[in-house]
Image: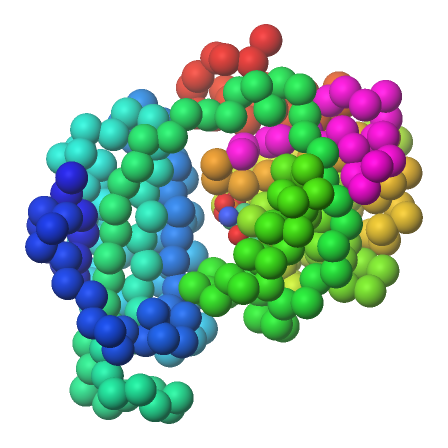
Amino acid sequence: EWILSNGEIVKEQDLEISKEDRGYQFGDGIYEVIRVYEGDLFTATEHIDRFYQSAEKIRITVPYTKDVFHKMLHDLVEMNSIDNGQVYVQITRGAAERNHQFPVNVEPVVVGYTKSVERPVAFMEQGVKATLIEDVRWLRCDIKSLNLLGNVMAKQQAYEEGYFEAVLHRGDTVTEGSSSNMYGIKDGVVYTHPATNLILNGITRRVILEICEEFGIKVVEEPFTKQQALEMDEFFMSSTTTEVMPVVEISGHTIGNGTPGKMTRKLQQAFEARIKLGVIS
Ligand code: PMP
């Protein structure tokens, strides 16, 4: 397997990571996950832009132009013959003697690799169950940070209770999922948390909002409460790997009639049309 290591594509066994890499010690870095459909990077420009934005927000400078970076990711996918899968890529502030303050004259460390992944078709057809969990993360969830402890703890709790995903809430307000964005549909209107510091503005979210606009579906980007979430006609989540994923139960409450809703189906199909595949009937 080929991996991306500091601007070069090398054999995996040639990767060397320092014990004092700041990603390893502090989670001092950011990352992206980009979907590959039939050998093509899906919404690559948007993911690459967000990678550079996240890096800038924590004052890391990506040491290549976006075009060069894009080409590296493209070459990596090609060299590993990835058909359907994903690219994971991260940048850390680099390796230096362990001190909280930024090190000086230290190069950032970039690592990327690919993986084959099937689309979660069965879940997309049947829908999944999710559970409300308090969002105890920091106040810069707009940054795709390597610090994912709050997300990891929430997902693990959901998983142990038999749920596919955590619906995070700050007090009464639903924010997003542990690794996804959340949406409710009531009387034909799509509700989702606005893209503030409290959520990650998903690339899938942006595609979905574009589709809504195309279809003339009204979207209200305003926070909704836990109670409102339970009373939605339809509910779904989205992410790079789960696409448009129907949520049919939240914390034991059935949403609608317990099957994926009509509008959710429509959005799934429109999303699928954008990736030029036809799996869901
Ligand atoms: N929110 C969080 C916390 C995430 O980790 C992710 C991505 N895994 C998302 C939302 C969805 O973002 P995207 O659609 O860009 O994958």
Query: In the picture shown, does residue 7 fall above or below 39?
Result: below
> Is residue 78 rendered to the left or right of residue 169?
left
Indicate the position of residue 179 as horizontal and vertical percent values.
56, 49
Residue 60 visible in rendering: no
Specify whether residue 250 is painted magenta: yes
Q: Is residue 173 above or below residue 250?
A: below
Q: Residue at x 68, y 38 (%)?
A: 163
The spot of residue 8 in percent (x, y) is 11, 55
Q: Nearer the viewer, residue 268 or 23?
A: 23
Decide: is 252 above or below 51. Answer: above
**Residue at 70%, 62% in the rendered image:** 135
Q: Is residue 235 covered in magenta?
A: no
Residue lying at the far front of the rendered structure = 160
| Quarter the N terminus occupies | top left
The residue depicted at 39 percent of the width and 64 percent of the height is: 30
Residue at figure coordinates x 44%, y 17% from the top left: 277
Q: Is residue 209 left or right of residue 55?
A: right
In terms of depth relative to the viewer, which is nearer, 249 or 183?
A: 249
The x, y position of residue 175, in whole percent, is 71, 56
Q: Is residue 24 visible?
A: yes
**Highlighted range, magenta:** 242-260
Whole-percent x and y of residue 171?
Answer: 82, 64
